[in-house]
Image: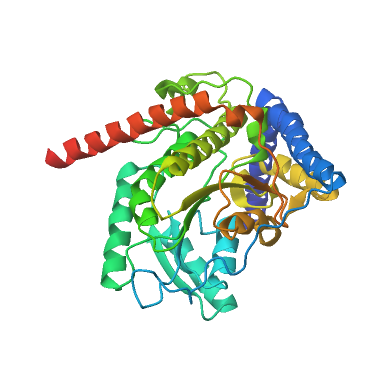
Amino acid sequence: MSDDSYLGFRRMGSMKTELKKAWQFLMSTEFWRMAVLWNLSILYSYLLLLSQRFLSFSINHRSETYYSHERDSPRSSEAVMPLCIITGATSGLGAAAALALSKRGFYVVLAGRSRHLLLKTMSEIKRQNEKALLKAFQVDLLSIQSILNFKNSLQLWLQDSKMHPSVQLLINNAGILATSSRFTSEGYDQMMATNYVGPFFLTQMLLPLLKNSPFPSRIVNVSSFTHRCVFDVQVDEYTVCGKCFSGLDQYPCSSIYEYSKLCLLLFSYELHRKLSLENGSHKLTVIVADPGVVKTNIMREVPTYLSKVALTILRLLRLLQLPKDGVDSILDAALASPETSGVYFFGGKGRMVKSSARSYNTKLAEELWETSSNLFLKSQIAMEGGTSS
């Protein structure tokens, strides 16, 4: 057999495998949930925007000068460079946000799992903005030990760089859409760990630095319109860990993704309420950003043929955005006026809509907070036990 024939045979085999995967996924309830409910959810979100337009309700809260590197710290005569941390910063929305915020005077910390991709992203940002101030840290949201190492490395870097020991902006952007069941070494479903548990743990660890900012600081959590598809919510440890999804005949990938994004919303609103009750001159705010449908690599685990068809249809419907456009809602949230908090940005141009009624359930949010805090405490205890042994 010639080399050309062998390569052709391999390509044919690979094509058959891809077609088989596509057919199996096409026949699953998860595919049709994504195809029907997700499209209805994004259309409903735009319908909310349209209704606001007819009601002449137009608000633009973005303030290009909200964070200025020329703003003096009340604690020092020296200027404090605003520091922004972005997770999932090696591609898509994270990279787009890093570039945009570097142009607005932020010292941008890129957080991601791959050192190679972090360096590649930094190089690309520098190519487009020579004056960009960037720093990269490896962090894996699947591991609480990695998150703790990141926090310690960040504090050491701030100290060694003689920078103010504070963070002005945290953007929890990292997220995945897994199509198969995988668990972390600490017992969490990987999608739940990346999309919700990891961001919760990271935020808890960085709260002291955010509160130590000499001027208003902010947390931006990147959620999704898919949270509107959640109809039954359980927030016990077994569910939040994702263990309830193991052992099923079919991994409910779309349901878990929706659920993780609703959890992020509930957490955001509960943190907003807790911070609002705190006394003190410092103001830390929490905002949710929904970028809509954006062409990123989040669909990489979906069979290639189906993802290409889906993206083509979304493009024809003019719902698909490139990262440079989809990042607008994240920038709206990041640069909103200091008093803005506990809101949901969607659609760019400073526009906000209401998230689902379930996301405003305070009792549910309190229960999720308690569950997540208990998991955080148990993880810390487990780490201390592992260190001492």
Q: Nearer the viewer, residue 177 or 381?
A: 381
Q: Residue at x 44, y 60 (%)?
A: 168
Q: Residue at x 26, y 71 (%)?
A: 160
**Left or right of 224 on screen, residue 308:** right
**Left or right of 31 on screen, residue 148:** left
Quadrant of residue 30 within the rendered picture = top right
Instruction: Give the total number of marks visible in the rendering.
Output: 0
Q: Residue at x 47, y 43 (%)?
A: 276
Q: Compared to 256, does 75 lie above or below? A: below
Query: Would you say residue 4 is visible in this rendering?
Result: yes
Q: Where is residue 128 drawn, in percent x and y?
A: 59, 76
Q: Nearer the viewer, residue 218 or 30?
A: 218
Q: Compared to 11, does 303 lie above or below? A: above
Q: Where is residue 188 drawn, in percent x and y?
A: 40, 32
Q: Where is residue 66 drawn, in percent x and y?
A: 56, 65
Q: Where is residue 236 drawn, in percent x and y?
A: 43, 21
Quadrant of residue 47 within the rendered picture = top right
Query: Would you say residue 186 is visible in this rendering?
Result: no
